[in-house]
Image (spheres, helix red, strand yellow):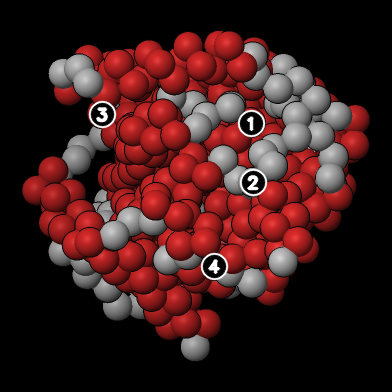
Amino acid sequence: MNDRSDELAEVRAGLRMANPPDPAALRAQAAWLEQLDRGPFWRRWRGWLSLSGPGYLQSALTLGAGTATSSLFAGAVFGYELLWVAPLGMLLGVVMFAAIAHQTLSTGARPLPAMATHAGRPFAFAWAVGAVLASMVWHLSQYTLAASSLVDLADVLGLPGVPPMVASTLLLTAAIAISWCYGRTPRLIRLYERALKYMVWAIVLCLLWVVLHTDTDWGAVWRGLTSFSVPERVRDVDATTLIAAGIAAAVGINMVFLYPYSLLARGWGRAHRGLARCDLLCGMLLPYALATGLMVIAAANTLHAGGAQVGKGATIAEVGKVLGQVLGPVAGRVVFDLGMLAMAFSTISLHMVVCGFVGAECFGHAVGSRAHRLWTLLPAPAFVAPAFFAGTPAWLGVPTSIACGTLLPVTYIGFILLQRSRGYLGSDRPAGWRGALWLSAMVAATATVVTMLARSLL
């Protein structure tokens, strides 16, 4: 009995941080949020938006090479027909993330030991290992995309011949400097999240510029969002594979690990539950749906409408040059390269943050400590990817996303078990028809991911 009590106490001990947030400031913020909850709707949301942050981490992490390649191929090959994929994938993720936020903020417990205690050690092990492996595997394609975008950007700006490894080394240096800021102090956490917020909306604006400078059939866009059609195979590109990749790229298993720990690193608690739901909608779902939708439309308006024969052998640089021709040989390529660079670089730094959290949690290091920072370097060797994969077809990001998504359903099942655990949530366990509806949505989200991945793999 004592062992069980000690185990539960360890689960609820909270996140260890080298420089934790100021308790007095957190209490004042919680009191302000409770006051907001009693105020009018518009004032509540305005206050919540001023404090948003963790949701943007998720947008920045998921807007990487996997999302870019699946969206570009969807638009280039199938036009507007697969516009529904990315928003659906993220909506499924928001259902699960809302449950994760409710669990984490209601209990204040560290999610990994909570899952080991209340769902089972195999689920916790699969979650931690899957988050690290996904970050390391996806890291390769991020550096390939970022370096090729930086090289092409230098070329179009009159600096030809920049070696890909030079570009990749610069990216690594910047990524280390940025990722090591996370967790050092609460102020640096806020600055980091704010920088990613601006980067995410910069991506959206770059893509919007391309769309506004091309001819868009908005009626067909609406049909693409609502028809849920699965078009026939075109050349060597299968729509089912792109759908599975798009859903897997929307919410990766490393995102699922980062999210609750970013909430704890901010010092959020029970009073922040409404804020967390607002943050998921406005910081995660909305920017991601806009960015992916605009990317599909841009590719459809240019590559698909222009009759470009885009297949699995196309590279990011080749696709970028075709898109760039719409806005001119300089401006178009600059916009495209900046968008791809921002997407890949933000994901690189966040992969490092994820590995730092996993290492800190599994080995008991404080977030912000030297050991935690060293764990962020785990995926760093991937910076040599451009030396081996230069000119690699962009299609590589599609099977990579599917492979990284295979352990996601196991993690989702773990959180479903936590959602039903009275020993974990106590009186905060969702009950009644709302609890049943929420649990059903989580099961449906998990079943959808399993079905899409299985269809693609088979």
Q: Which residue is mark 2?
A: 12
Camera-near label (4 vs 2) is 2
As rendered, which of 274 and 359 lies closer to the eye? 274
Q: Earlier in the sequence, mark 3 or mark 1?
A: 3
Q: Label 3: few (<14), some or many (≥20) within 10 Å?
A: few
- Label 4 belongs to which residue? 414
Give the CA separation, mark 1 to mark 2: 15 Å
151 horizontally vs 205: left or right: right
Calculate the distance from the C-alpha at mark 4 to the C-alpha at mark 2.
18 Å
Per the image, label 4 sits on a secondary structure element best described as helix
Question: Disc 1 designates what residue?
Answer: 265
Instruction: Give whichever of discs 4 and 2 has the lower sequence position.
Output: 2
* Cα–Cα gap, marks 3 and 1: 39 Å
First in sequence: mark 3 or mark 4?
A: 3
Question: Which mark is drawn over residue 212?
Answer: 3
Query: Which residue corresponds to the image point at 64% horizontal and 46% vertical from the top-left?
Result: 12
Q: For this view, does 90 lie left or right of residue 21?
A: left
Circles 3 and 4: CB atoms closer than 8 Å:
no
**Quadrant of the frame with the N terminus:** bottom right
Q: Give the residue displayed 39% in from the left and 56% down from the top.
A: 429
Q: Nearer the viewer, mark 3 or mark 4?
A: 4
Q: Amino acid at mark 4?
A: Gly
At horizontal 59% and vertical 66% (from top left) the residue drawn is: 118
Disc 4 crowd, CA 10 A, few/some/many (<14, 14-19, 20+): many
Q: CA distance from mark 3 to mark 2?
A: 50 Å
Do callouts 4 and 2 mark residues in contact (Cβ within 8 Å)? no
Residue 408 seen anywhere in this rendered image of the structure = no
